[in-house]
Amino acid sequence: VVFGFNLEHYSVVSLTVYDLTGRTFPILINEYLPAGDHAYTPGEYYKNLAPGLYFVQLSIDGNTFQQKWINIEGHSFAN
């Protein structure tokens, strides 16, 4: 799965994954990024996540957006 987003200007960005219990996994992004399109693929750690429902939280300059991520035995779907 690839998590993509567009920034209108240089922004503080964090991208976090957590499960239904609220447990947070290693943060994917926590930095300043330039304007433009960005796409991030979770690293090796995320390939070993148990099947289930997860949430991806994107924070851009303090504005937070959330998306569901369904991980089904080697296949991932985000909506």
Image: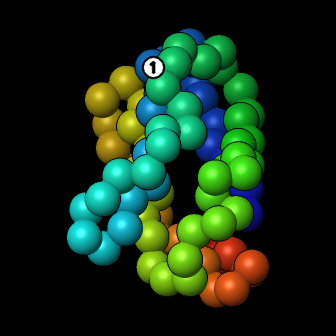
> Mark 1 = which residue?
12
Whole-percent x and y of residue 69?
Answer: 53, 71
- Give whichever of 73, 38 is nearer the camera: 73
In this picture, is 57 found above or below 67?
above
Q: Residue at x 48, y 26 (%)?
A: 30
In this picture, is 62 found above or below 17?
above
Disc 1 marks a residue whose amino acid type is: Val
Q: Is residue 30 left or right of residue 76?
A: left
- Give whichever of 49, 77 is nearer the camera: 49
- Give whichever of 78, 50 is nearer the camera: 50
Number of marks in the image? 1
Provide the secondary structure element on which disc 1 rests.
strand
Q: Residue at x 56, y 82 (%)?
A: 51
Q: Is residue 64 left or right of residue 25?
A: left
Please identify the quarter of the rendering in which residue 79 is found. Answer: bottom right
- For the N terminus, the quadrant is bottom right
Q: Is residue 62 left or right of residue 50?
A: left
Please identify the quarter of the rendering in which residue 64 is found. Answer: top left
Q: Work out whether residue 24 can be spotted.
A: yes
Whole-percent x and y of residue 17?
Answer: 45, 54
Q: Residue at x 68, y 75 (%)?
A: 76
Q: Work out whether residue 79 can be spotted.
A: no
